[in-house]
Amino acid sequence: MAVNLVTKFLPYVDEMFTTESKKSLLTNNDFTWTGAHTVKVHKVNTVAMTDYDRDGSGVGMSPEEGDPVLWSRYGALGTVENTLEEFTLTKDRSFTFVIDKMDKEETDGVLDGASALARQQREVIIPEIDTYVYGKMTAGAGTKETEVTLSIDNIYDEIVEGNTVLDNAEAPDTGRVLVVTPDTYLLMKKCPDIVMETDIGEDMRLKGVIGNLDGLTVIKVPKKRLPVNFGFMIAHPVATVAPTKLEEYKTHQDPPGISGELVEGRIVYDAFVLDNKKMAIYYCENKPSA
């Protein structure tokens, strides 16, 4: 005699693991795109210093024969001019899906518009934006090191050297962030020269900060959100503008032609590395070993 065993379905969803975005620690929103699709930013030059001509012997003369530059006791007459950087938003992304009313009822509420929208944000939208922003930052970095294979023996020296590059470029001393993959972080933990300060406030831990090293705030980002062969990146938020001009999500109950919920979303965003501040980004690629 056969026995029909009972199958029980629980109102539980096996959610994917996701990581919160950390791009707010690496970027800024200094510019506003309100009422515009493109923003233009001025760059203004400076002039060189020279020796003051105290006795006036060079007044009215050019430092080089045939050069029409006006000359005074203060030196050659320079000109302060401006050039423009243009930033146009290029990412206008959207999604939509339907949850049928009977599907929702007969799955014990597992298929719910609000939870599905939150899942879409966690598993699709945030990873996409992170990947795009990190890609723009590494591509626009002022310094790119591509010939290093990171190891336990050299990871500390490479990070300190990168930080020194920012020092020599006169990037702001405070607020720098070190971005590492879990694999790079593993090398750091095994390196005997690295002793990270881990006394981090709870507010910073919630943002994803895992420690401090050589004055750098250390954050760990999954490698699938980063360029291939990513080793580490040192960046100051002042270098990258990452605007989100529009972010809207809507849930329509029983719209025309649908018995259930229609969910729609749209997000307009981009990321730009400022030309005069690109030296505040140092990117080290982890060259695969032969």
Image (cartoon, grey):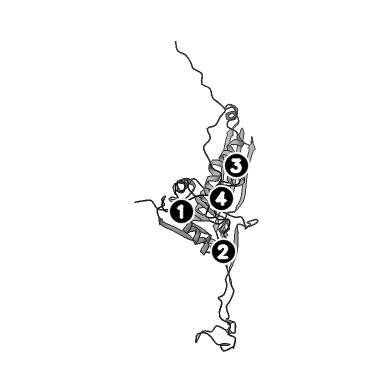
Tell me where residue 58 appears, x and y as whole percent: 56, 87
For label 1, the crowd category at 10 Å Cα-Cα, with few meaning under 14, some 14 to 19 and many 20 or more, is many
Name the foreground residue: 4 vs 103. 4
- The residue singled out by tag 2 in the image is 85
- The residue singled out by tag 3 in the image is 264
In three-dimensional space, the C-alpha distance between marks 4 and 2, rounded to whole angstroms, equals 23 Å
For marks 4 and 2, the one nearer the N-term is 4
Number of residue marks: 4
- The residue singled out by tag 1 in the image is 156
- Residue lying at 52% horizontally and 47% vertically, measured from the top left: 128
Helix, strand or loop status at disc 4: helix
Tell me where residue 71 appears, x and y as whole percent: 57, 84
Q: Nearer the viewer, mark 1 or mark 2?
A: 1
Q: Nearer the viewer, mark 4 or mark 1?
A: 1
For marks 2 and 3, the one nearer the N-term is 2
- Residue lying at 42% horizontally and 57% vertically, measured from the top left: 146
